[in-house]
Structure formats: structure tokens, C-alpha cells
Amino acid sequence: MRPRARVAASATLTVLVGVGVLWLSGGLRAADTPRSVPPGREVDQHLFRTRLVGAHVAVVKKTKFTAERRLLVINAWVTNPTRETLGTSGADSDHGVFSHGMFLHWNSRNGPLPKLVDAQAIAGNTLFRSLQPQLPTYVAVQYELTPRTVVPDQVTVALASYEHAEAGILDPRGYWEWQARRFEKKVETNPLTHKSGRVTEIIPVLAANVTLPVKR
């Protein structure tokens, strides 16, 4: 599955935007492959300035109410260069949050794809989900792993590029969206209403690939 954002739909279809996962087994076209950047080097996504600095596997211990879980955690220093507060995580339909512009390259031989479950900013013992203007913030993006998922010794993360668009005459602020490499149309079925409709999806420009060693 390629990274994508739906930008139009029929009146009969309301859909949630899934966060993309790049499958190495044919998921990318050659033109989609971005430049490679080493860990710790800043990548300008326009909406975010990002330094991916590490990856590790974490275990959330079993409690009375929840089973034990494994997480793949990607850590980054993120700066919001705009004048407005942005989010680290949010509704699936909002790809203007930090974690929705990150995509894992994933090989199906390693088992089920990791599922994005949260992205939290960290300051001391405080966890939050906002990125204040001009303030470098440490962020942990969390992907849940199934028992059958095998995490490789290193993972490659792609970062989307963004662009600012006009919102119309009533809203001078405009909004941010993925910079489009191309658009694709398809028919999808709403899992709640079971109604089908045509959607147009953005295939974003990818600003960079960053390969990170995974700590155990």
C-alpha cells in the first residue's frame, strides 16, 4: 500500500484515511523513491523540519485489563516552522499531523504490517500531542506489532513533503496538504455504511528516506 490521502469522494461515501505503509514488494514506483538521508540529519518537509534519530522495540506489560503488547517506536526531533500549533497524531482523515506524513518501508516476509497507534511528544515525564511554533520537540511515533511480526535489524522510514494551499475567500489562513506527485482514482466501500463511491487519492512526493538501526 502506498502513502495516500483522499481528496474527493462521492456524496454516498465517507471514508477514513489510513496511514500508508510502503511495501517493498512492489509498493513503490521507481519515480517515487526519494533521496536517502542518514539518521539525525534534518529533512525539510515544509510543514515540519524533522530529524529521525532512532528506532527501538518496546514491550508494554500485561495489566489486569490489557494483554502484553509490542511496539515499534520511531523517535524524532520535530520543529514546527509555522505560526500555528500542529499535532503529532490525530484523526485518520487529517494528514496534516506529523505521524501521518511518515511511512514505513515494510517487507511482507516480516509478517503483518505494524499499525500506527499513537505519536506523542515528550518533555521530561510529560506526554502531549502538540507541536508549538518554532520549538524543537522530541516525538515518539508508535506502531503496534502482532505476535507474528518480525522486526528487522533496521527499518527505513519515508517522509512526505507538504505544500500550502488556499482555502477560499472566506478563510485567508489556507491549509497544508501533501505535495502531490500524482493522483489516483478508485472505488472504495465504506465499512460502516457498505456504500461504494469513487475517491481520488494523493500519492505524495516523498522528501527523504531515512534508514534507522533498531534497538532491542
Image (cartoon, rainbow, N blue to C red):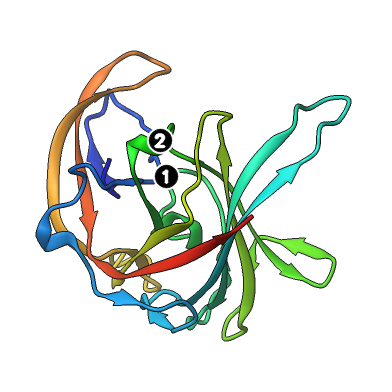
Closer to the camera in the image, 57 or 92: 57
- The amino acid type found where label 1 is placed reads Ser
Label 2 neighbourhood size at 10 Å, few (<14), some (14-19), many (20+)? few
Residue that protrudes farthest toward the top in the picture: 194
Q: Looking at the image, is 92 positioned above or below residue 37? A: above
Badge 2 is on which residue? 16
Image quarter of residue 216: bottom right
- The amino acid type found where label 2 is placed reads Leu
Label 1 neighbourhood size at 10 Å, few (<14), some (14-19), many (20+)? some
* 166 relative position to 75: left or right: left
Closer to the camera in the image, 22 or 81: 22
Q: Secondary structure at mark 1?
A: loop
Q: Are marks 2 and 1 in contact (CB under 8 Å)?
A: yes
User: Residue 143 at x, y = what percent?
Assistant: 55, 46
> Which residue is located at x 24 percent, y 25 percent?
188
Q: CA distance from mark 2 to mark 1?
A: 5 Å
> Which residue is located at x 22 percent, y 65 percent?
205
Badge 1 is on which residue? 93
Q: Looking at the image, is 128 positioned above or below residue 187? A: below
**Res 114 label:** none
Q: Secondary structure at mark 2?
A: loop
Image quarter of residue 27: top left
Quarter in which the N terminus is drawn: top left
* 212 relative position to 73: left or right: left
